[in-house]
Image (spheres, helix red, strand yellow):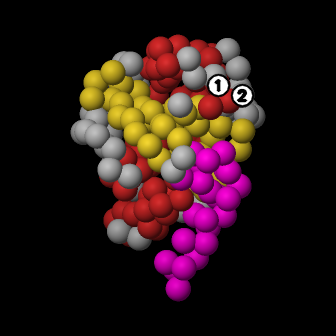
Amino acid sequence: MLLWVGLGNPGPEHARQRHNVGFMALDAIAARHGLPPWRRQFKGEATAGRIGPERVLLLKPLTYMNRSGEAVQAAAQFHKIPPAQIWAFHDELDLPPGRLRVKQGGGTAGHNGLRDLQRALGTADFGRVRIGIGHPGDKARVTGHVLGPFAREEAEGWLPRLLGAIAEAAPLLAAGRPDAFASRIALLMQQEAM
């Protein structure tokens, strides 16, 4: 079993914020692949099912971003899922809006959710699906940017296209082909832009 974690903050007041794009990605995957309704489990909301060749547990921690590791640790311990089979879907300031990168392991780049996952798992050896939200250009505006809602042109433009592409390409990530997953998303986004 794989564990895919969307990073975000619970509650309707946070639902459309840039910081919650990880939750949005998991919602799109669950809908596209017909997974059962979300249920309260592991200090979060969870659903599970087959995506491509693998059974995948999707988890949206309800512990707030800075304590995401608590939920992930609980789910990973219960299902005996090693860090190398965990993927975190999260917002990335250092990528332009609508761009996506995947990588296994690495640093936290100041992302509090990733930092707490690393603390809870005792390692940085988990995957990251980095979803670009862009940088506001001034460090003093970062908090307002990530905790602000997507602009209307984003919410009606690249965001639903990217979330749809992530959901469509998800079986490639489940199959252990992260590079093919990223390439497929890039291709789908390019086709949509035409």
Mark 1 is on which residue type?
A: Pro
Q: Which residue lies at the image location 28% right of the left edge and 40% below the top edge?
A: 36
Q: Which residue is mark 1?
A: 83
Q: Which residue lies at the image location 54% right of the left edge and 46% below the top edge?
A: 53
**Dots 1, 2 in contact, CB < 8 A:** yes
Mark 2 is on which residue type?
A: Asp
Whether residue 130 is visible: no
Q: Which residue is mark 2?
A: 125
Q: Which residue lies at the image location 59% right of the left edge and 31% below the top edge?
A: 86
Q: Which residue lies at the image location 40% right of the left edge and 39% below the top edge?
A: 49
In this view, 178 is above or below 84:
below
Query: Alpha carbon of mark 1 to alpha carbon of mark 2: how far?
Result: 6 Å
Q: Secondary structure at mark 2?
A: loop
Give the magenta range.
Answer: 171-194
Q: Secondary structure at mark 1?
A: helix
Badge 2: few (under 14), some or many (20 or more) residues near its Cα, within 10 Å? some
Magenta segment, prevailing SS (helix, strand or loop): helix
Q: Is residue 20 magenta?
A: no
Residue found at the very far bottom of the displayed protein: 194
